[in-house]
Every structure is written in structure tokens, then in C-alpha cells.
Image (cartoon, coloured by chain):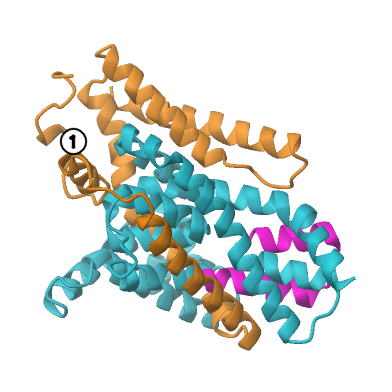
């Protein structure tokens, strides 16, 4: 059932955020430490487990992938509620600090991405994942990739 | 008539947000295909349009949440808020290539460390250049360059001045906006086209909203990899900002 997929996603998110809060308290930090990242790792683990036990049905998958495909619209909504006025009217110190750190980090990305670089592996699978997140394919329409593994 | 329509939008806020954002994306895809012949992603245009609308929304209402401060569009606040944003980010992990992610694990850690130190360095140097001499203000502004959450968390922990706090938040927000807009422009130049570099990028840029927007506008398949590292960034920043980084700054400026 579709709701099982959504519930799995919700459960992973809740546990992840809870653990992130816990980690924050343990480290004496007033913030959630990596809650969403922990939730992502939990979901990846859940998917591997379900695949291995052949329990990942189409509907369950649809429940998760629907939300993955809503990612870009949600990000657009997020952009539409940023405090852009504050960003634009911040003055020189804000602009210099922000531009400087962004440019430096872009450069560091170029550097790190090249260290130990190698030919991309199995692009097809990553490519298909992109189509799901872009909301261009719907899960039930494509042939099952779960049965063969 | 118009009043009734507004009433429907207020009452059905989230549903109205779905319709409005859907319309915005439809227009953006059309613009992307027709005006740029597909050279610019529709989602990149949609994100920039969203930011432009947020600017005018902020001007019109004087609020801090862009379009979401307009009562009829309040649903955008829920749709694009932290709850659903994180929910959708977690969902993208379902598409992660586990082997790829594991291989880039160490790279992600290095990126996270650099992504905390480099912006902090730029932020503190800028603060010093603009005449700030006390360790608390310098650290708070530097932390703002990490992300707009690390800034105020650090500032609050150190008891920073409210104008310094505002500067710190504004720096973080400007950084997020610049990452959203800038990423698709420089993606090819910095080799951002595979899961490995996306994980480095996520750890370096940090700001979850910036990374989420930047990767969505560049290439959706990279989203989960970048998000995976980026979500640890704010937590780490909040951890070292008011402690380790502050102590170093205090030791240097006295």
C-alpha cells in the first residue's frame, strides 16, 4: 500500500530528527546535529533491507518516490519565502563575506571533486534516479527493477 | 467576489500553494524551453522567480518570509517550510547509489571540515576589515558566513550585539541565495556533474536551502548526494562556532 511507503519515510525522518536532537544535547549544541542525514541513511538501509527480502512493492515505492518527486516544487516554495529583502539590503560587509565564502567554496569543490577522481560508475542507475527526483517519470510506469535483484 | 476568492486561498492554504507553485513551474519550464532553448533548467528559472517574488513579497508586507507573509499565500510557508523540505530531502535518499555514497564518505568529511573553516575565515577577515575588534562580534559574523542558522546560534551563545546578529543572519541568507542562483552557472566549471563531486559540494557549501536549491536547479540526480553531506553542516557549525572557533579568535585578538 502507498501509505506504507509514506509511513516508512515518515518513520525514518522522525527517528533521524530525534537522534539528531539527541546528538545535539549530548554535544551540548543548541541545534539538531545531522538529523536529516541520519534519516537519509536509515531510509537507504530500509530500502536495501526491503530489496533483499523482496518486500519492496510498487505501491510502497510510490509512497516514497512521490515525495522525492515533490522535492523541486518544495524547493521553489522554499525560495519564495526567503528573506531576500534582508539579503539585498545587507550592505557591503554582508555582500563581501557572502560572495567571498561562496566563491572560495566553489573553488574548493572543483579541487576536491578532482582529487582521486575516476570515471563515473554505472551512470544509468544514477540517471534514472534523477528522473524520479525531477518528477519526470512515475514509478508504476517503469519496469520493475526490484524483482531481478 | 475577490474577497471570496481570497477567503478560499486562506482557508485552503496548502492546496492553494500547490496550485500557485505548479503554475510557477509551468511558466518557468515554458520560459526555459522557449527563451533559452532548454539551455537553462526550468527549475533554475523557477527558483530565481521564487526569489524575485520573495523580494517583492517582502517589500509589500515588510515581513521576513517573502511571499508566505501574504495571507492568501501563507500555504507557501508550509509547503516550503523546514518540515516538508526535510521530508522531501529524506525521500530523495531512496534514489541513492549506496556504493557511490560510501566511496565518497571520506571526501564528504573533508568537505565538511573545509566548508566550516573557509567561510568562517572569510567572514572573520571581512569583519576585521570593517573595523570589528572584539572576539564575540568577529566570531558571530564569521559564523554567519557558515550558515544563517550557525550565525545566530553562535551569537546567542556568546551574547553578541543585536546589530551584529542581524549582520550575521543577513550574511548567511545572502550566501544561501547566492548558492541557489550561482550553482547552475558554475556547475560545469567546477566539475559538478557526478555523485562524488556533489557530496564534496554539499559539505563545502553547507547551507541546506542553498544546496537544495542549487542542485535542484543544476541536476536533480545529484540532489541526494549533496543533501547527505549538507545536512551535517549546520550541526557541526553550531558545535564548533561558539566553542573551538571562538576560542581561536579570542586567542588571536585578545
Q: Pinpoint the chain carrying mark 1.
A: A
Q: Decide: is B96 above or below B171.
A: above
Dot 1 alpha-carbon crowd within 10 angstroms: few under 14, some 14 to 19, many 20 or more: some
Q: Decide: is A142 above or below B144.
A: above
Q: Decide: is B17 above or below B128.
A: above
Q: Quadrant of residue B24?
A: bottom left
Q: Position of residue B204 (x, y in %)?
A: 50, 58
Q: Residue placed at 20% from the left, 25% from the top?
A: A58
Residue B15 appears in view: no
Q: Decide: is A5 above or below B31.
A: above
The answer to whether residue A139 is magenta is no
Q: Position of residue B80 (x, y in %)?
A: 45, 56
Q: Which residues are magenta?
A: B148-175
Front-most of residues B66 and B235: B235
**In the picture provided, is B213 more to the left or to the right than B123?**
left
Q: Which chain is cyan?
A: B
Which residue is most to the front?
A116
Give the drawing colour for chain A: orange
Tell me the residue that label 1 is attached to: A139
Which residue is most to the top?
A53
Q: Quadrant of residue B212?
A: bottom left
User: Helix, strand or loop at disc 1?
Assistant: helix
Amino acid at each position: 500500500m502507498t501509505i506504507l511507503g509514506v509511513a516508512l519515510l515518515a518513520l525514518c525522518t522522525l527517528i533521524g530528527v530525534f537522534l539528531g536532537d539527541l546528538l545535539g544535547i549530548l554535544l551540548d549544541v543548541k541545534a539538531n546535529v545531522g538529523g536529516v542525514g541520519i534519516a537519509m541513511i536509515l531510509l537507504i538501509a530500509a530500502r536495501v533491507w526491503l530489496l533483499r527480502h523482496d518486500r519492496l512493492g510498487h505501491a510502497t515505492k510510490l509512497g516514497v518516490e512521490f515525495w522525492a518527486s515533490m522535492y523541486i516544487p518544495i524547493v521553489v516554495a522554499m525560495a519564495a519565502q526567503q528573506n531576500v529583502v534582508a539579503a539585498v539590503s545587507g550592505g557591503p560587509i554582508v555582500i563581501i563575506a557572502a560572495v567571498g565564502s561562496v566563491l572560495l567554496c566553489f573553488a574548493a569543490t572543483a579541487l576536491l571533486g578532482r582529487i582521486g577522481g575516476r570515471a563515473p560508475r554505472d551512470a544509468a542507475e544514477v540517471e534514472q534516479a534523477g528522473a524520479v527526483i525531477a518528477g519526470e517519470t512515475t514509478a508504476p510506469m517503469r519496469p520493475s527493477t526490484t524483482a531481478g535483484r | 467576489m475577490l474577497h471570496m476568492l481570497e477567503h478560499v486561498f486562506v482557508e485552503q492554504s496548502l492546496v492553494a500553494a500547490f496550485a500557485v507553485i505548479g503554475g510557477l513551474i509551468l511558466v518557468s519550464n515554458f520560459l526555459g524551453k522557449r527563451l533559452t532553448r532548454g539551455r537553462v533548467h526550468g527549475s533554475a528559472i523557477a527558483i530565481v522567480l521564487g526569489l524575485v517574488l520573495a523580494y517583492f513579497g517582502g517589500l509589500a508586507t515588510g515581513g521576513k518570509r517573502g511571499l508566505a507573509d501574504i495571507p492568501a499565500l501563507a500555504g507557501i510557508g508550509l509547503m516550503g517550510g523546514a518540515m516538508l523540505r526535510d521530508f522531501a530531502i529524506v525521500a530523495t535518499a531512496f534514489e541513492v547509489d549506496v556504493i557511490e555514497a560510501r566511496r565518497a564518505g571520506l571526501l564528504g568529511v573533508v568537505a565538511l571540515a573545509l566548508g566550516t573553516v573557509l567561510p568562517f575565515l572569510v567572514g572573520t577577515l571581512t569583519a576585521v576589515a570593517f573595523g570589528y575588534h572584539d572576539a564575540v562580534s568577529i566570531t558571530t559574523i564569521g559564523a554567519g558566513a557558515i550558515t544563517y542558522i550557525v550565525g545566530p546560534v553562535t551569537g546567542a551563545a556568546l551574547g553578541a550585539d543585536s546589530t551584529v546578529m542581524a549582520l550575521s543572519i543577513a550574511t548567511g541568507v545572502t550566501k544561501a541565495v547566492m548558492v541557489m542562483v550561482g550553482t547552475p552557472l558554475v556547475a560545469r566549471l567546477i566539475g559538478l556533474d557526478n555523485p562524488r563531486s556533489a557530496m564534496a559540494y554539499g559539505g563545502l557549501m553547507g547551507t541546506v536551502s542553498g544546496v537544495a536549491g542549487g542542485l535542484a536547479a543544476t541536476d536533480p540526480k545529484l540532489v541526494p548526494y549533496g543533501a547527505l553531506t549538507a545536512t551535517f553542516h549546520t550541526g557541526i557549525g553550531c558545535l564548533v562556532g561558539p566553542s573551538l572557533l571562538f576560542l581561536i579568535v579570542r586567542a588571536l585578538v585578545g
